[in-house]
């Protein structure tokens, strides 16, 4: 089922490094994730650039405050051990604080985790070699999270379409690239000649009563929606991630039982166990549309109040711990 190969794990070194050495090594690895310049940093893996301007420096400051509060928060000591491959989960990804607050941690080389998690910040992932240890695998079959693949899975799960044929449809539409996290959407008029690497989708009217655009950011744990971040921004920046308001809601507050079942079915089709979904609700029809999905969700959103950042992370930590225990028991024949 999973595209993995048998590979003997490397044993631990017989001489354990000191805590200070381990800390320096971890910091060095983090710094190597970026290409640094006087004007900003570029993420080596994805090519995303973060300029050193006032807005981004403010976001970094607020994230640092949240991160410090997380690492100083009370936590149990019996959380799950997760093996990340091919990349480690860095602190700015939502899985890191969630795992930390379970009392768990990332597995080190030579350790057998409770769950293996495919972790790579790319739209298309390659098969990964893992030890033949019988441990559950998460996200290892979610190889393709391109916009066209997401739209196809959405139509299969919900029974109605997001994608448009740009040569046949007449009217306004959204043109965007296939890759995750690039926020390059723009409104175009169809019909038109399709551009290479672009997809064309329905223009969803996701305005609230006051005219702000509303995104329903929905993290999933074990393929099930765990909570909802309502992110709001002006229409002029509707395709960006520059939120002016954000608040936390329960899944049942936002979605019907039928919608929750369809979201879960969508995750099953994509083989997405842990991830983040961008969902829009159309103002006129009331229908929801999943417009994006990824396996390396960042967050919580910067615009969310700090108390809700921490509350949402505890919710995800609880769901993660329960889900890891379920898959561990199932793998061992306990369920």
Image (cartoon, grey):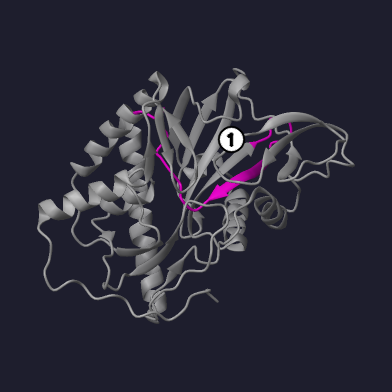
Image location of residue 255, percent across then percent down: 57, 43
Q: Is residue 82 left or right of residue 140?
A: left
Question: Would residue 335 be seen by someone viewing this image from the given angle?
Answer: no
Q: Residue at x 63, y 54 (%)?
A: 262
- Nearer the observer, 51 or 60: 51
Which secondary structure dominates the residues rendered in magenta?
A: loop
The residue to which callout 1 is attached is: 183
Q: Residue at x 67, y 56 (%)?
A: 153
Quadrant of residue 267 within the rendered picture = bottom right
Quadrant of residue 78 within the rendered picture = bottom left
Q: Is residue 324 left or right of residue 128?
A: left
Give the magenta-colored segment's residue range.
Answer: 281-305
Quadrant of residue 264 within the rendered picture = bottom right
Rendered position, 281 above or below 245: below
- Nearer the observer, 259 or 296: 296
Image location of residue 271, percent across then percent down: 56, 63
Q: Residue at x 53, y 74 (%)?
A: 3
- Nearer the observer, 15 or 166: 15
- Nearer the observer, 120 or 203: 120
Image quarter where the N terminus lies is bottom right
Number of marks in picture: 1
Rendered position, 82 above or below 134: above
Q: Is residue 165 magenta?
A: no
Q: Is residue 289 magenta?
A: yes
Residue lying at the far front in this picture: please name it: 37
Q: Residue at x 19, y 55 (%)?
A: 76
Rendered position, 258 above or below 183: below
Image location of residue 99, percent across then percent down: 31, 54
Question: Would residue 176 be seen by someone viewing this image from the given angle?
Answer: yes
Image quarter where the C terminus lies is bottom left
Secondary structure under badge 1?
loop
């Amino acid at each position: 089922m999973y595209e993995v190969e048998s590979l003997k794990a490397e044993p631990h070194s017989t001489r354990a490094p000191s805590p200070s050495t381990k800390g320096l090594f971890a910091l060095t690895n983090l710094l190597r994730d970026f290409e640094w310049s006087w004007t900003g940093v570029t993420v080596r893996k994805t090519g995303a650039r973060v300029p050193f301007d006032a807005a981004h420096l403010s976001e970094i400051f607020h994230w640092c405050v949240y991160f410090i509060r997380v690492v100083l928060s009370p936590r149990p000591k019996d959380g799950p051990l997760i093996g990340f491959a091919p990349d480690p989960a860095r602190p700015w990804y939502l899985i890191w604080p969630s795992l930390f607050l379970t009392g768990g941690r990332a597995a080190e080389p030579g350790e057998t985790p409770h769950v293996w998690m495919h972790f790579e910040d790319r739209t298309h992932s390659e098969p990964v070699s893992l030890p033949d240890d019988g441990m559950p695998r998460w996200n290892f079959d979610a190889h393709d999270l391109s916009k066209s693949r997401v739209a196809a899975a959405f139509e299969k799960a919900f029974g109605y379409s997001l994608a448009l044929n740009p040569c046949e449809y007449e009217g306004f539409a959204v043109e965007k690239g296939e890759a995750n996290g690039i926020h390059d959407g723009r409104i175009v008029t169809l019909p038109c000649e399709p551009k290479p690497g672009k997809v064309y989708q329905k223009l969803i009217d996701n305005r609230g009563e006051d005219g702000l655009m509303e995104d329903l950011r929905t993290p999933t744990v074990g393929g099930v929606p765990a909570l909802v971040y309502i992110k709001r921004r002006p229409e002029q920046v509707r395709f960006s991630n520059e939120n002016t308001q954000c608040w936390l809601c329960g899944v049942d507050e936002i979605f019907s039982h039928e919608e929750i079942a369809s979201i879960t079915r969508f995750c099953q089709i994509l083989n997405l166990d842990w991830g983040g979904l961008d969902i829009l609700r159309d103002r006129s029809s009331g229908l929801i549309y999943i417009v994006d999905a990824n396996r390396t969700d960042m967050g919580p959103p910067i615009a969310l109040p700090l108390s809700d950042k921490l509350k949402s992370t505890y919710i995800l930590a609880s769901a993660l711990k329960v889900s890891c225990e379920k898959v561990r028991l199932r793998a061992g024949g306990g369920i």
